[in-house]
Every structure is written in structure tokens, then in C-alpha cells.
């Protein structure tokens, strides 16, 4: 596995090196030893799978508040998505900045989104599926979200946003004095 730093502290891209032969291929999706520099003393406690059918659909931007903050490791296992992390951490030098990666099985990349960052994605190919590894259990009382079209963030989505859930379309705009979230 290759670990690539991004401009946002803690947001990294993991490149998986698949092994291929005439029969097909094999990829290691997670290795605690190889990812120790990224994961630290956290442990994976939950794995989720999502399938989104419509091209242009956006899921996000979601996060969990302290003390239920979570790191997510996100990989596309079918289709293609534009995966986005937004820095919402109080005092961060990259506060309200975002980083995106195209994830697809063919590029064997995984995006790591640390605590204090919101996460979302846009579907670029129908019937796209994501696998999420989480370092904290889902806690509905700690969930938060930011509009995918928040002007203070300015995410450049590759396609028009065509489908949002009621929850995701209901996130209020960030106030001018939004301080960020505590990790």
C-alpha cells in the first residue's frame, strides 16, 4: 500500500497495489500493520456498504460530533464516485477547505477522512457501491451535516447535483461565525 498525503492534514489517499495473473486479481483492502501510520491506536469497529443508483446523486456531507467522532476509510468497490472530505476542525489551518478523489475499483484507491472532517460523494457511474470502514460506532445523536452546495466551502462537483435525500437537502447554511467542530 502506498500512502499519499493531501493538502488537508490527516486526509490521505491509500493506493492499493493489486496482484494480477491470468485468473484475475487479488487486493488487500486493509492491513493494520501497513496502515498503522495513518490509523494510530484506533481500531475499525464498523464496516458499512452503500449502493447508489443514479448518476449525479450526492450523499453527504456527513460527520459525527465529539465524543463520537470517527475516522472513515472509504473505497469504491463498483462503479465510480467523486469522493470529498471537508475540513471542519476548529483551529485547523485548512478549515473549510476540501479535497476530492475519484474512486473506482480500477484505480484501487481509498480515501481516509479523519475525525472533524465531513464526508460525501457524487456518483459518476450508475449502481456505484462504496465500502466504509469506521473507527466509531454510528451515533444518531452525534450526527451532523453540511450542505453539499455550501457557498463557504465551494465544492466543485463534476456533474450537476441531481438527487439528494431529504436529510441532505435540509442542512442549514453555515453561519458566518461557524467556529468548526471539536475533535
Image (tube, grey):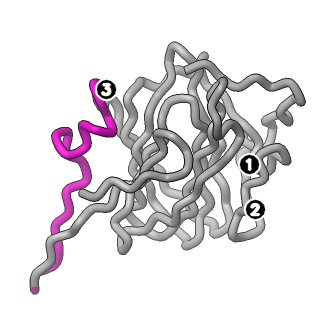
Is residue 33 located in the magenta-colored stretch of the structure? yes
- Could you tell whether 108 is left or right of 83 in the image? left
Residue 143 in picture, x, y percent from top left: 61, 25
Q: Residue tagged by mark 2?
A: 161
Q: Earlier in the sequence, mark 3 or mark 1?
A: 3
- Could you tell whether 148 is left or right of 25 in the image? right
Residue 103 in picture, x, y percent from top left: 46, 64
Is residue 153 located in the magenta-colored stretch of the structure? no
Task: Identify which residue is drawn at 75% across, 62% down.
Answer: 161
Q: Residue tagged by mark 3?
A: 42
Q: Quadrant of the C terminus?
A: top right
Q: Is the C-beta separation of discs 2 and 1 under 8 Å?
A: yes
Q: CA distance from mark 2 to mark 1?
A: 9 Å
Q: Secondary structure at mark 3?
A: loop
Q: Is residue 28 above or below residue 151?
A: below
Q: CA distance from mark 2 to mark 3?
A: 34 Å
Amino acid at each position: 500500500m502506498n500512502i499519499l498525503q493531501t493538502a488537508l492534514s490527516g486526509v490521505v489517499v491509500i493506493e492499493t497495489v493489486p496482484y494480477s495473473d491470468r485468473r484475475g486479481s487479488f487486493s488487500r483492502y486493509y492491513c493494520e500493520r501497513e496502515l498503522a501510520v495513518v490509523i494510530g491506536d484506533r481500531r475499525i469497529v464498523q464496516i458499512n456498504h452503500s449502493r447508489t443508483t443514479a448518476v449525479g446523486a450526492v450523499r453527504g456531507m456527513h460527520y459525527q460530533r465529539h465524543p463520537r467522532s470517527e475516522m472513515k476509510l472509504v473505497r469504491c468497490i463498483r462503479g465510480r464516485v467523486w469522493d470529498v472530505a471537508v475540513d471542519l476542525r476548529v483551529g485547523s489551518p485548512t478549515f473549510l477547505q476540501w479535497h476530492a478523489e475519484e474512486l473506482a475499483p480500477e484505480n484501487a484507491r481509498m480515501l481516509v477522512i479523519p475525525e472533524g472532517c465531513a464526508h460525501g460523494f457524487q456518483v459518476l457511474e450508475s449502481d456505484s457501491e462504496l465500502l466504509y470502514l469506521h473507527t466509531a460506532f454510528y451515533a444518531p445523536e452525534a450526527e451532523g451535516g453540511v450542505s453539499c452546495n455550501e457557498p463557504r466551502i465551494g465544492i466543485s462537483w463534476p456533474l450537476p447535483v441531481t438527487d439528494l435525500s431529504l436529510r441532505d437537502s435540509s442542512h442549514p447554511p453555515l453561519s458566518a461565525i461557524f467556529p468548526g467542530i471539536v475533535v
